[in-house]
Amino acid sequence: MLEITPIPAFEDNYIWALINRAAGTAVLVDPGDARPVEAFLAAHSLSLTGILITHHHGDHIGGIAALRADRAIPVFGPANESIASLTDRLRDSDKRQLPGNTTYAVSVLEVPGHTAGHIAYRVDEHLFCGDTLFVMGCGRLFEGTPAQLYASLQRIASLPAHTQLFCAHEYTLSNLKFALTVEPSNEALQARAFKVASLRESGLPTVPTTVAEELETNPYLRCHSAEIRANAEQFAGSSLANEVEVFAALRRWKNEFR
Ligand SMILES: [Zn+2]
């Protein structure tokens, strides 16, 4: 049985810990800072057996060197990004055993767009998607094209509906505000607003989400919606030929949305 717990870091990052209680071991996804991780491992008497990296941004890789200083552990990461200290450079469809855990395998999906080589890790019915998809949102386009990120999001959306999505930031309330602006008549969105607001009021994470929930409420997965298209066209000041153009307009709009 795999236990998955967020370790909060920086302002709004989640470093995900995949814990095998029986063995007393943990694998981390995107440890941007070693300090909260060391405190967590000590508090729970866990030994670290491996690290999974989704992309090269500092708030995802900043803790690797300190965590490996006195541990000879594997560090998985994207083959198409330049990251020091990776021991396994992974490509689409690659499969590995979860380090230190003989029960679970991890498989790789390339999901470029936020960065050029961004990958996601699928473990059973769980996807660790880094900065590609957020709850009711998506990552910024730093290195890829709108078409690339749109295709990556569609790939995540095509996973089984109950797949749990573990993103790397708590951006939900800001994303919700934008989603309600672009699709105000979406009843699933209105219902979800109450749920996530009460979680945040209690100081709880809104992550993970599921493919099913995102299909109903994430505007970037709903570029087929007539209401979203009309609002995106109004923002763009022109008609938009297809869903990728609607997506690109939404992403530009969100960049300047307050
Ligand atoms: Zn990033």
Image (tube, rainbow, N blue to C red):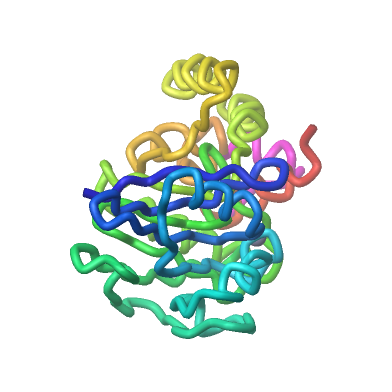
Stretch in magenta = 229-241
Residue 121 found in image quarter:
bottom left
Reply above or below: 23 against 21.
below
Residue 237 covered by magenta stretch: yes
Q: Position of residue 195 (x, y in %)?
A: 47, 18
Residue drawn at the location 44% of the way across and 48% of the way down:
166
Question: Observer-nearest residue: 144 or 35?
Answer: 35
Ligand 1's image quarter is bottom right
- Residue 185 in picture, x, y percent from top left: 52, 19
- The foreground one among 137 and 96 is 96
| Residue 66 makes an appearance in the image | yes
For the point 49% across and 52% down, which residue is it? 41
Q: Is residue 168 above or below residue 216?
A: below
Q: Residue at x 60, y 70 (%)?
A: 64
Q: Quadrant of residue 104?
A: bottom left
Q: Position of residue 228 (x, y in %)?
A: 56, 35
The percent position of residue 107, horizontal first and vertical second, equals 31, 70
The quadrant of the image that shows the C terminus is: top right
Residue 165 covered by magenta stretch: no
Residue pictured at 26% horizontal, 42% vertical: 162
* Residue 145 can be seen, yes or no: no
